[in-house]
Amino acid sequence: MKLQLDVKSVIAGAVAAAVIVAAFSFRDTGTADTAARYQTKVSGSEVVILDTYTGKYIIAPEIRNFGKVQWVKGSFTDTWATGLDNKKAVTADEAK
Protein backbone atom coordinates (compact mmCIF):
# COMPACT_ATOMS: atom_id res chain seq x y z
CA MET A 1 0.00 0.00 0.00
CA LYS A 2 1.50 3.21 -1.13
CA LEU A 3 0.64 6.35 0.85
CA GLN A 4 1.12 9.59 -0.95
CA LEU A 5 0.36 13.05 0.46
CA ASP A 6 0.34 16.18 -1.60
CA VAL A 7 0.34 19.77 -0.35
CA LYS A 8 -3.27 20.35 -1.38
CA SER A 9 -4.53 17.41 0.72
CA VAL A 10 -2.51 18.47 3.78
CA ILE A 11 -3.84 22.04 3.61
CA ALA A 12 -7.42 20.80 3.17
CA GLY A 13 -7.04 18.50 6.18
CA ALA A 14 -5.56 21.28 8.33
CA VAL A 15 -8.39 23.66 7.40
CA ALA A 16 -11.00 21.00 8.16
CA ALA A 17 -9.39 20.27 11.54
CA ALA A 18 -9.25 23.99 12.39
CA VAL A 19 -12.94 24.42 11.52
CA ILE A 20 -13.93 21.45 13.68
CA VAL A 21 -11.86 22.68 16.65
CA ALA A 22 -13.29 26.19 16.29
CA ALA A 23 -16.85 24.86 16.11
CA PHE A 24 -16.46 22.87 19.32
CA SER A 25 -14.70 25.66 21.19
CA PHE A 26 -17.70 28.02 21.23
CA ARG A 27 -19.69 27.96 24.47
CA ASP A 28 -23.42 28.21 24.88
CA THR A 29 -23.81 31.32 27.04
CA GLY A 30 -27.62 31.22 27.12
CA THR A 31 -27.88 28.52 29.77
CA ALA A 32 -24.91 29.68 31.85
CA ASP A 33 -26.47 33.10 32.46
CA THR A 34 -29.68 31.70 33.93
CA ALA A 35 -28.10 28.98 36.04
CA ALA A 36 -28.93 29.48 39.72
CA ARG A 37 -30.84 32.68 39.00
CA TYR A 38 -33.64 31.89 41.43
CA GLN A 39 -32.72 30.97 44.98
CA THR A 40 -35.34 29.27 47.14
CA LYS A 41 -35.28 28.89 50.90
CA VAL A 42 -37.90 26.84 52.71
CA SER A 43 -38.33 26.75 56.47
CA GLY A 44 -40.98 25.09 58.58
CA SER A 45 -43.59 27.77 57.98
CA GLU A 46 -42.20 30.07 55.28
CA VAL A 47 -40.98 30.07 51.66
CA VAL A 48 -38.71 32.75 50.15
CA ILE A 49 -37.89 32.91 46.42
CA LEU A 50 -35.22 35.45 45.39
CA ASP A 51 -34.35 36.47 41.83
CA THR A 52 -30.60 37.03 42.19
CA TYR A 53 -30.37 39.14 39.01
CA THR A 54 -33.06 41.71 39.78
CA GLY A 55 -33.20 41.46 43.58
CA LYS A 56 -36.95 40.91 43.55
CA TYR A 57 -38.40 38.37 45.94
CA ILE A 58 -41.66 36.77 46.93
CA ILE A 59 -42.36 35.40 50.38
CA ALA A 60 -45.06 32.99 51.47
CA PRO A 61 -45.41 33.51 55.21
CA GLU A 62 -47.02 30.85 57.32
CA ILE A 63 -50.11 29.29 55.82
CA ARG A 64 -53.18 30.38 57.75
CA ASN A 65 -55.85 28.42 55.90
CA PHE A 66 -55.19 25.03 54.38
CA GLY A 67 -54.25 25.48 50.73
CA LYS A 68 -54.32 29.29 50.73
CA VAL A 69 -50.96 31.04 50.59
CA GLN A 70 -50.63 34.81 51.03
CA TRP A 71 -47.69 35.82 48.81
CA VAL A 72 -45.78 39.00 49.64
CA LYS A 73 -43.55 40.49 46.94
CA GLY A 74 -40.82 43.08 47.16
CA SER A 75 -37.45 44.23 45.92
CA PHE A 76 -34.32 43.49 47.88
CA THR A 77 -32.65 46.74 46.82
CA ASP A 78 -35.66 48.86 47.86
CA THR A 79 -35.98 47.05 51.18
CA TRP A 80 -32.24 47.43 51.82
CA ALA A 81 -32.26 51.15 50.94
CA THR A 82 -35.31 52.10 53.02
CA GLY A 83 -35.17 49.52 55.77
CA LEU A 84 -38.92 48.99 55.37
CA ASP A 85 -40.41 45.73 54.16
CA ASN A 86 -42.91 45.75 51.34
CA LYS A 87 -46.02 43.99 52.64
CA LYS A 88 -47.99 44.08 49.41
CA ALA A 89 -49.80 40.82 48.80
CA VAL A 90 -50.00 39.43 45.29
CA THR A 91 -52.19 36.89 43.59
CA ALA A 92 -50.87 33.72 42.02
CA ASP A 93 -51.14 35.29 38.54
CA GLU A 94 -49.00 38.30 39.50
CA ALA A 95 -46.32 36.09 41.06
CA LYS A 96 -45.59 34.43 37.69
Image (cartoon, rainbow, N blue to C red):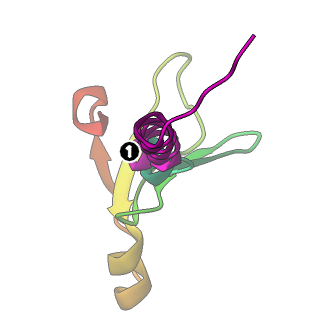
Q: Which residue is mark 1?
A: 30
Question: Residue 68: horizontal and vertical position, in percent?
Answer: 46, 22
Taking the magenta stretch, the answer to whether it contains residue 32 is no
Instruction: Describe residue 96's horizontal placement relative to residue 44 as left or right.
Output: left
**Main secondary structure type of the part rendered in magenta:** helix
Q: Amino acid at mark 1?
A: Gly
Q: How far from the left and from the top, in percent, is residue 67?
A: 51, 16
**Residue 2 seen in render:** yes
Where does residue 60 sit, x and y in percent of width and height?
51, 42
In this view of the protein, which residue sits in the foreground, 68 or 16?
16
The residue lying toward the viewer, choosing from 78 and 68, is 78
Q: Residue at x 29, y 33 (%)?
A: 96
Q: Which residues are magenta?
A: 1-30
Asked whether, in this view, residue 66 is left or right of residue 45, the answer is left
Using the rendered image of the protein, determine whether residue 49 is visible from the camera's viewpoint: no
Farthest-out residue, front: 2
Question: Where 49 sits versus 87, above or below?
Answer: above
Q: Residue at x 42, y 43 (%)?
A: 15
Q: Is residue 56 above or below residue 85?
A: above
Is residue 18 inside the magenta stretch?
Answer: yes
Image quarter of the N terminus: top right
The answer to which image quadrant residue 46 occupies is top right
Which image quadrant for residue 78?
Answer: bottom left
Q: Residues within 10 Å of mark 1 (few under 14, many from 20)?
A: few
Q: From this view, report whether residue 29 is shown above or below residue 84.
A: above
On screen, residue 40 above or below 82: above
Residue at image position (61%, 27%) is: 4
Nearest the viewer among 26 and 88 is: 26
Q: Secondary structure at mark 1?
A: helix
- Residue at image position (27%, 33%) is 91
